[in-house]
């Protein structure tokens, strides 16, 4: 088989199987660095050996090779017997269905700071490069690398267990895990690179959310997160046109939305809304207002803004404030000058310094205010900041149409 074709298959296997292979090796070794090294080496071996024939089960082949490499490394270690007691109770061959969730809980242990929890999980669960982790978190690449390294050292030094916590430990751990799963989805929903979406990441996030719901069926926030992801995922096919261009929600053909996925998402979000008012419940409520509206024009924007107002009380982040301002601009009769003032104030937030959606939102409002020169400058800024080529083309077309 040609090297180019093998590389394509290996790349697809990396996207689909990275986290499950890694999690299986972590279960065996309890050593994140060793597990990551051996997982990477397994993919290198695939590049060398798969030209002779692609295995029927690429993920299983990679798991077997990575675990064998890890065992070989452990046998060569002089401290093997010291490491053996740290192995989990069930170090059997192959992967377990809960392995990825165990790895998420390990990465989100309360001994780690939130920033480190998120960075490490994006690296290990998603297999994102350090640069991609930095892009998702809106931080510099050296900062992302430092967070990942610091988190791994902390896990090793503290002997943090690789397991799903006991029932009484779950409430204190839940918010961090929900945040990370949501960020995994976000990393795939608008991916860095040529593709708008990485379905391996969005699919993995939905899978993890389902596992969390099974683990904590009476908690509203996991239900809400799953509902939010399903409602977003249901619109996936309509987000891209036949020629591969981005289609905004306002212009999407709603008949292309997945009705089964949409119905489940709305049902889960509605059930969660009746039992809580946490931030994921409110985000799911916003998504529900969008997908149940008969059309973009008939969306209840006033209610959307109210949801964001409630969200800001419990989760006062710059991104929530930006989403709230964007929704405010769409309320019939809204004062766009006051919205622009809000957006300009958000431009002073360090967390939004490299966030492409802020100048894009400013450009839209400026264009609607009849200030095309300023809107063009804002679009140019947004274009330089976006890491996704599909979004970059969309913004470029907006800029071109603005100046015609």
Image: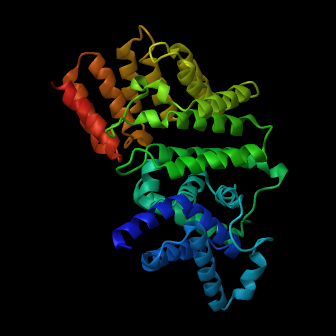
Q: Nearer the viewer, residue 228 or 334?
A: 228
| Spot occupied by residue 12 in the image (x, y as percentages of width and height) | 47, 60
- In the displayed structure image, the side of residue 291 where residue 110 appears, left or right: right
Q: Quadrant of residue 36?
A: bottom right
**Going 49% across and 25% down the picture, which residue do you hit?**
255
User: Is 38 located above or below residue 80 in the figure?
Assistant: above
User: Is 362 located above or below residue 125 in the figure?
Assistant: above
| Spot occupied by residue 318 in the image (x, y as percentages of width and height) | 48, 34
- In the displayed structure image, the side of residue 280 where residue 9 appears, left or right: left
Quarter of the image where the C terminus is located: top left
Indicate the colouring scheme. Answer: rainbow
Residue 314 visible in this rendered orientation of the protein: no
| Spot occupied by residue 374 in the image (x, y as percentages of width and height) | 23, 26
User: Is 83 located above or below residue 212 in the figure?
Assistant: below
**Going 35% across and 48% down the picture, which residue do you hit?**
387
Q: Quadrant of residue 354?
A: top left
**Going 43% across and 25% down the picture, which residue do you hit?**
253
| Spot occupied by residue 100 in the image (x, y as percentages of width and height) | 65, 58
- In the displayed structure image, the side of residue 193 where residue 111 appears, left or right: right
Residue lying at the far left of the rendered structure: 404
- In the displayed structure image, the side of residue 69 where residue 398 appears, left or right: left
Residue 251 visible in this rendered orientation of the protein: yes
Q: Quadrant of residue 351?
A: top left
Q: Looking at the image, how many numbered discs can be counted on the residues?
A: 0
Quarter of the image where the N terminus is located: bottom left
**Going 59% across and 63% down the picture, which residue do you hit?**
151
């Amino acid at each position: 088989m040609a090297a180019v074709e093998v590389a394509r298959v290996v790349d697809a296997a990396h996207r689909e199987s990275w986290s499950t292979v890694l999690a299986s090796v972590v279960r065996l070794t309890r050593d994140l660095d060793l597990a990551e090294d051996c997982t990477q080496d397994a993919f290198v071996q695939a590049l060398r050996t798969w030209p002779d024939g692609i295995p029927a089960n690429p993920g299983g082949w990679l798991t077997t090779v990575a675990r064998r490499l890890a065992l070989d490394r452990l046998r060569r270690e002089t401290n093997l017997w010291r490491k053996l007691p740290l192995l989990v109770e069930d170090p059997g061959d192959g992967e377990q269905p809960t392995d990825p969730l165990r790895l998420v809980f390990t990465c989100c242990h309360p001994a780690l700071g939130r920033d480190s929890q998120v960075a490490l999980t994006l690296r290990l669960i998603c297999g994102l490069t350090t640069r991609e982790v930095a892009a998702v978190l809106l931080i510099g690449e050296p900062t992302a690398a430092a967070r990942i390294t610091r988190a791994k050292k902390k896990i090793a030094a503290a002997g943090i267990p690789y397991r799903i916590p006991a029932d009484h430990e779950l409430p204190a751990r839940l918010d961090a895990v929900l945040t990370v799963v949501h960020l995994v989805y976000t990393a795939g929903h608008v991916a860095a690179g040529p593709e708008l979406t990485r379905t391996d990441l969005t699919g993995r996030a939905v899978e993890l959310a389902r596992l969390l719901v099974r683990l904590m069926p009476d908690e509203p926030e996991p239900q809400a997160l799953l509902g939010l992801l399903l409602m977003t995922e249901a619109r996936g096919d309509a987000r891209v046109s036949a020629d591969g261009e981005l289609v905004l929600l306002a212009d999407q053909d709603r008949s292309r939305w997945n009705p089964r996925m949409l119905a489940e998402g709305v049902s889960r979000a509605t059930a969660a809304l009746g039992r809580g008012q946490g931030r994921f419940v409110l985000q799911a409520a916003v998504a529900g207002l969008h997908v149940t509206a008969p059309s973009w024009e008939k969306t209840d924007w006033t209610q959307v803004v109210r949801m964001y107002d409630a969200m800001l009380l419990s989760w006062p982040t710059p991104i929530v404030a930006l989403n709230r301002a964007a929704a405010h601009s769409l309320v019939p009769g809204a004062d766009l000058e006051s919205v622009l003032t809000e957006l300009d104030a958000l431009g002073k937030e360090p967390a939004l310094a490299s966030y492409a959606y802020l100048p894009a939102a400013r450009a839209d409002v400026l264009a609607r205010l009849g200030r095309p020169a300023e809107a063009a400058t804002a679009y140019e800024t947004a274009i330089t900041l976006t890491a996704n080529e599909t979004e970059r083309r969309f913004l470029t077309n907006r800029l071109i149409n603005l100046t015609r």
